[in-house]
Image: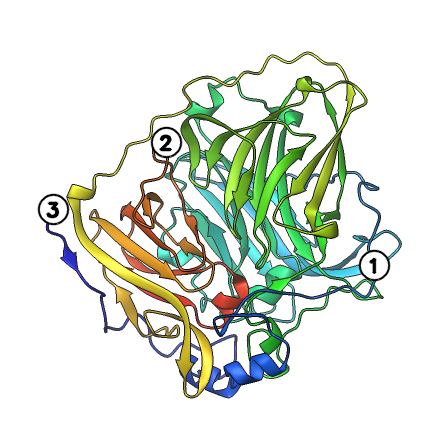
């Protein structure tokens, strides 16, 4: 193998776009205004590793609710308003709503159809889905289908703004495998606060291969959006944003952590289950928190899917790690417990209340015709010998005009700068390195992990769209660019890092 090495620099992919509906400041100008120096961060109490900010907990002033006191809500399944030979058509309206999250308090959310999470869209592979998003909020929005193999005009580029009172039709051809996807706001510089307020929902893609398997289905196929939030005494969800300009306050520029764990928008909920197998679609919808999920008392979770769909074969595990943006599908077999048992899903990476997620109450015997087959799917391993380029991407904090920002290859995000120009149909290896932890998300192209700190991962390859870079780590991924030419982004899915410059353009040519 003799791939071309190096970083693609220079070029123009867009010009004259405004940012967040305001003046067209460059990223460098905006971050210069921030004045995010290490001394300022230290003075404000920001946690640091080697001078680099890390996520900080924002404590609630509302009393924390009792765990397992509310039932698990299941997001409403959206219904198409029209179906024809061409596509299925949906409409979602982003609007403010007052909902009860903490018992006895009202919380204002920004939700698709006023719901948090938004309605779940269930679609079919190869069947075009068109989603009209109408903006009934007082701020611009952008909607991104996370994990979608999507043409650039519908991918949710961060400056493709839908202004208040306007709408946009997003076309998703769904020429991709069955998978647990999700949609969320992707507005330039304001993704963190707008997702925090509730702009996220499930988008589940099915196909014939998956439908032929005897996996748990129907009421035993349960999507679980796990996220953390903090609450003020009046029930509001404050976000520590800057009074002027985008991004989080200095203390929280490493990431915002909440102290209340929500599942499908409910605090530490409970789900009553049969003594049977359940498919749990686990999504980390947090801004910055990573989870280590395990059953208590101890039990086995069987991994059957990842970001990009089914694995080649099931993998029994004792725990599942999820960085922000990642998804894992697991099967939990509650027939291993007795009626009356209570089984917790715990977060081994948390402490105190943040170590608890939800509870399953085993309360009835029931027939179970499901099974976990030894073979789930066929996954083609991408061949490194066929890579036409190897590119390096360094994710780090760095100095800009005397301040500190989040950079890729030493640069803050600039809509006019293109970091890589892969050719349509080519396979490339991208090597990403970190200072502190950065969950790296690639738009358009699913990838496979080749190595972590030089070591190959165990087991056969799986398809991913988000990979966790832990502190001081190097991960090599391999991907093939198919389907569409155009401009896309890669970025850190710690939403505070993303909002504060850690994003880069790539242009498929």
- Mark 1 and mark 3 in contact? Answer it, CB < 8 Å: no
Residue 161 seen:
no
Q: Residue at x 83, y 62 (%)?
A: 62
How far is disc 2 from disc 1 in space, using C-alphas? 47 Å
Q: Which residue is mark 3?
A: 1
Q: Earlier in the sequence, mark 2 or mark 3?
A: 3
Q: Earlier in the sequence, mark 1 or mark 3?
A: 3
Residue 243 seen:
yes
Residue extending furthest toward the right: 104
- Mark 2 and mark 1 in contact? Answer it, CB < 8 Å: no
- 411, above or below 279, in the image: below
Crowdedness of circle 2 by 10 Å Cα count: few (<14), some, many (20+)?
A: few
Q: Which residue is mark 2?
A: 459
Q: Residue at x 54, y 39 (%)?
A: 320
Q: Residue at x 73, y 61 (%)?
A: 230
How far is disc 2 from disc 3 in space, using C-alphas? 24 Å
Query: Is label 3 in a helix, a strand or a loop?
Result: loop
Q: Earlier in the sequence, mark 2 or mark 1?
A: 1
* Residue nearest the observer in this picture, 308 or 161: 308
Residue 106: mark in rendering:
1
- 157, above or below 218, in the image: below
* Residue nearest the observer in this picture, 40 or 327: 40
Query: Which picture quadrant has residue 255?
Result: bottom right
* Residue nearest the observer in this picture, 80 or 63: 63
Q: Residue at x 51, y 38 (%)?
A: 328
- Foreground mark, 2 or 1, reads 2
Query: Is label 2 in a helix, a strand or a loop?
Result: loop
Count of numbered circles on the image = 3
x then y, percent, for residue 87: 46, 40
């Amino acid at each position: 193998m003799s791939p071309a090495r190096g970083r693609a620099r220079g070029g123009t992919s867009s010009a004259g776009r405004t940012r967040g509906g305001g003046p067209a400041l460059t990223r460098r100008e905006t971050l210069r205004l921030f004045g995010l120096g290490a001394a300022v961060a230290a003075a404000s109490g920001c946690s640091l590793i080697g001078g680099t900010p890390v996520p900080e907990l924002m404590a609630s002033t509302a009393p924390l609710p009792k765990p397992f006191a509310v039932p698990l809500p299941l997001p409403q399944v959206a219904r198409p308003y029209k179906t024809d030979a061409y596509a299925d058509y949906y409409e979602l309206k982003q609007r403010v709503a007052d909902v009860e999250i903490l018992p006895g308090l009202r919380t204002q959310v920004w939700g698709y159809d006023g719901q948090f999470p938004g309605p779940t869209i269930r679609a079919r592979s190869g069947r075009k889905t068109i989603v009209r998003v109408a903006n009934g909020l007082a701020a611009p929005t952008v909607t991104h289908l996370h994990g979608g193999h999507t043409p650039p005009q519908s991918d949710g580029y961060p400056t493709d703004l839908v202004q208040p009172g306007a709408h946009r039709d997003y076309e998703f051809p769904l020429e991709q495998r069955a998978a647990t996807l999700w949609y969320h706001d992707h507005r330039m510089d304001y993704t963190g606060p707008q997702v925090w307020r509730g702009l996220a929902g499930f988008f589940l893609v099915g196909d014939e291969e998956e439908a032929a398997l005897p996996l748990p289905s129907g009421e035993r196929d349960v999507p679980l959006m796990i996220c953390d939030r903090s609450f003020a005494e009046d029930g509001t969800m404050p976000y520590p944003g800057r009074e002027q300009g985008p991004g989080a306050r200095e203390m929280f520029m490493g990431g915002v952590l909440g102290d209340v764990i929500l599942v499908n928008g409910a605090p530490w909920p409970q789900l009553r289950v049969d003594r049977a197998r359940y498919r749990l679609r686990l999504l980390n919808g947090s801004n910055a928190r990573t989870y280590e999920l395990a059953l208590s008392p101890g039990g086995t979770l069987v991994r059957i899917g990842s970001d990009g769909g089914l694995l080649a074969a099931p993998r029994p595990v004792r725990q599942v790690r999820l960085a922000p943006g990642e998804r894992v599908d697991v099967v939990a077999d509650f027939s291993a417990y007795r009626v009356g048992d209570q089984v917790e899903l715990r977060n081994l990476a948390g402490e105190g209340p943040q170590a608890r997620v939800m509870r399953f109450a085993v309360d009835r015997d029931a027939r179970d015709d499901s099974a976990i087959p030894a073979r789930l799917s066929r996954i083609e391993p991408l061949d490194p010998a066929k890579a036409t380029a190897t590119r390096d991407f360094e994710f780090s904090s760095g100095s800009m005009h005397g301040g500190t920002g989040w950079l890729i290859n030493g640069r803050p995000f600039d809509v006019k700068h293109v970091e890589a120009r892969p050719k349509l149909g080519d396979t490339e290896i991208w090597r990403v390195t970190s200072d502190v932890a950065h969950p790296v998300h690639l738009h358009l192209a699913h990838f496979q992990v080749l190595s972590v700190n030089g070591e190959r991962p165990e087991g056969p390859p799986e398809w991913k769209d988000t990979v966790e870079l832990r502190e001081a780590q190097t991960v090599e991924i391999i991907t093939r660019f198919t389907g569409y030419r155009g401009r896309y982004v890669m970025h850190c899915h710690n939403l505070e890092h993303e909002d504060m410059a850690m994003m880069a353009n790539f242009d498929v040519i």
